Each structure stands twice: as C-alpha cells, then as structure tokens.
Image: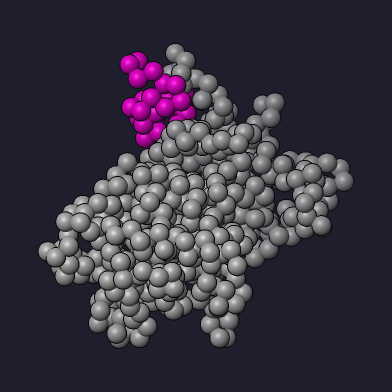
Amino acid sequence: MEIHVDTLQKALQINLDLRWYGTIAEIGAGQEVARWFFRAGGAAGTVAKSMSAYDMAVSDAVYGKSDRYVSKGRLQAMLDREFQLNLDRLSEERGDETAFFAFADTVVARSYRGGNECHGWMGVKFQAHPRDEPSQIVLHVRMLDNEAPQQQEALGVVGVNLLHAAFFQHHEPDRVIERLLDQLTTGRIEIDMIELKGIEFRAVDNRLMALKLVQVGLSGAAMFGADRQVLQPSEVLRKKAILVERGSFRPPTVVNIDMLEAAREKFEGDPAVAGRDVLMLTELTMANLRAGGDVVDRKDFLARADLLSACGMTVLISDFLAYHRLAAYLAWRTDGRIGMVMGVPSLLSLFDEAGHADLPGGILEGFGRLLKNDLRLFVYPMLRDGEVVTADTVTVGEELQPLYDYLNRRGSFVALDNYKPDYLPILSRDVLRRIPADDGTWEAQVPPEVCAVIKKRGFFGYPRGR
C-alpha cells in the first residue's frame, strides 16, 4: 500500500537526519507513532526513548496526578517532562550538535464494546536548532474509522506527519497544517484544534491556524475565545446550553449585541436551561468569509475577530452553510438546550425551498433536522417600510404559510419583543460605508469597545490620523 511507502519515507528521512533526537511517549492505542520509526530503520539516530504508561498509577507516577488522562493538560505534562529529561540527561554530551524533541500523544481509540468517542491529544515540543529555545505544536484529533486497527494506523500516520512537518516545515505554518493529512482523508481523521507556540512560531496568530483547519477541510468548525486563544470545541461545548448568532459582524453593531442579550433573557427562562452554564457564540461561516470568491481575506477576518474579542465573544468558524448542519454539530457535543439567534430576514431565507434542494426530503427534512431536540429560533424584528415586522407578523409564500404557522404555534420560533426599538434602523452595511467617510454617525451604532478598536487600528478604511 502507498500509505506505508510514503509514511515510511518520512520516518526514514527523520531517522537519517542526525539533527533531531528525542523521546516518543504514547498513552492509549499502542505505540503507533514510534512503530513507524523502528520499522523504517535507523531509529537509533532519532529515538532516545520510547515509552507507554498505560496503567493510570504508572502514568501518575511519571507525569503527576490528573483528573483526565485524555486531555490537553496531561499532554502538556508529558511534553514538558520528556523534553526536560532529554535536556538534563543529554545536553552536556551532545547538546552542541543535537536539536532535542519530545513527541507525545494521549488517546482513546475504539473500545471492544464500541460507542465511545475516539479522540486524543497529540503534540511535539522541539528545538529547531541545537541549544535553541523550544517551540511546540499541539493538536486535538478525532479518529473516524469504525475499527480500532484502522484508527490506530491513522493515528500513527498523523503522528509521523506532525513530526516531519515540525522538523522540516516549521518556517511555513500553513504548510504544517496542509501536511497533517498526507496519506489520509478527512473521512478518517478530524483535527479541530491546533496551537503553535514558542520561538519559531512567535509571529503566528493561532486564530489564522483555526481558520486554516476549516479551510482545508480538516474540521467542519474551529473555535477561539475572547482572549484570542484557540479552543477545543467539544471541551467548551460539553454540557452547556448554547445560544449562537450567525453573522458577518463586519463590523459588530449594537444590534448584534442586543440580539444576543434579548435572546439570552428569553433563553434563560426555559426550564430546560435552568442550572446550565449558557455559552453565547458568534459564528462566522466560510461562505461569508469568502464573500463569493475562493480566497479569504485574512486581514479582514482578523479585524472581525478582534472586534468580536473586544465584545467578549467566543467565536466559532464553520463550514456549515445550512443551519441544520450547525445544529447537528452542536447537538453532538452537548446535551444542553440549543438556541439560534437571527433576524427576520434570515428566518425568511429558511423558507426558500431552493436552500433545501440537497436534502431528499426538501424543506420538510431541513426543518426536521434543524428543530429536533427542541431547538428554538430566537427571532429579532426588522423594519420594513417603516413598520416593525416580527416572527408573529411576518408572512411567507402562500403554499408554505401553513408550515410556518404550525412551526410558530409549536414554539419553534420565539419572537424577541424585548428589543431596543432605536436599533432597528441600524444596518451593518450602512455602518461599514460610513466608517471611511467623514460621517461620525456610525460611532453610536457600534459598541464603544468596537468603536475604539476600529479607530485605533484603522479597520475598514478608517483614517488613523483623523
């Protein structure tokens, strides 16, 4: 099989390059990464030690106690200890010509009983040059094969890809991500978080790396927090009640914030939400970021990301154009209630049958998928010809009105009557048009923190010297 040839070639190239020398430590699913290096031959030039601490007591004795063994914290403890041991034991003898590394993974593959989530954390801490400060790449993987042996094989290939990319492509972070799937497919492996840090990656913005994961299809979604740090979605979403607003946020306006706050007030009144932590998400879709083209303007993306961070928002980047795909993604990761916040125009777009053409059951299947698990749409009103249009007063096509009325009566649509009337005339496109012009009316139409960042950073054409 070609998979063995190419992955073996990568392992052999590393083995024959005398610069890198270190440790491979793996918990769960076997010695899948180390195996490639021993199979390739010449591993004595690369592997100072390989180990597997399966027993929890043994693992705790080596790396310290942990509440969760398949976690970023456990992975970091593994990387830090093994890297430091290499420095302590080998630096004096060979530190002048050797760049040390520690590779680690902690994973749970398919169990004999099945049904468990198959995922893990993987990372490498390494010196790009002898005596250098360390750099590090950490990622979260999900194994999608149905059988444990295939999951183990895929895990081993990703590990070799990660080491090879770290050693030979660390100066091109985008290439690091592109190389992770060599000899694999997105049907076998998902990578929904990657974090690069250290001296080699000091100029890297990990939000762009999150965007890249979704761009290349390694994950359907990626996430980062208000502190600009990338997040692992399953850990953040787990057991939360989730309220999500999709938008362009170019820029975020007071309307965007009021939509979320008004929806939250209603959402928290739901008995099913009582006692749950509520996570509010702002979602940017790849379709919106591409704006009809193939290329994402990274500067524009980071401007929007910075402004949402200024508002204290957690950001989800997704490749889910259809709302029901976003709903399915969230529902798989939480058992809490899910609410989606949208304006009347977005609700009307859901009643465009062409938007459901890819589903065998058409619009009925689309709404069935979207609204299962009691998901609700929290609908902010709009102005039309000077009149306020709400979820209770809007009309759709004559043949679809009975469907609309049924869904509204069953409580699937929640009309947000606790909105601020003064905000209804505000439109993002008008704000965007006014920012570069000599027209200060936009300043009151965005949150104060957004206004401050736009002026300071010169976003969206704002003249910095004004």
Residue 190 seen: no
Q: Identify which residue is drawn at 61% across, 62% down.
A: 187
Q: Residue at the right extreme? A: 399
Residue plotted at (78% across, 55% down): 359
Can residue 63 be seen from the camera position used here?
yes
Counting every numbered tag in the picture gives 0
Q: Is residue 254 magenta?
A: no
Q: Of residues 14 and 311, which is closer to you in this image?
A: 14
Q: Position of residue 252 (x, y in %)?
A: 48, 36
- The coloring applied to the image is one colour
Q: Classify the position of the C terminus by image quarter.
A: top left
Q: Position of residue 446 (x, y in %)?
A: 45, 31
- The main secondary structure of the magenta stretch is helix
Foreground of the two, 84 or 256:
84
Q: Is residue 290 above or below residue 378?
A: above
Q: Quadrant of residue 106?
A: bottom left
Between residue 259 and residue 85, name the one nearer to us.
85
Expressed as whole percent of the image width and height from the top left, the position of residue 25 reads 34, 73
Q: Magenta residues?
A: 442-466
* Residue pictured at 55% horizontal, 24% vertical: 430
Queried whether the magenta region covers residue 453, the answer comes back as yes
The residue positioned 82% from the left and 57% from the top of the image is 360
Image position of 139 (left or right of 59):
right
- In this view, 52 is above or below 442: below
Q: Nearer the viewer, residue 22 or 17?
A: 17
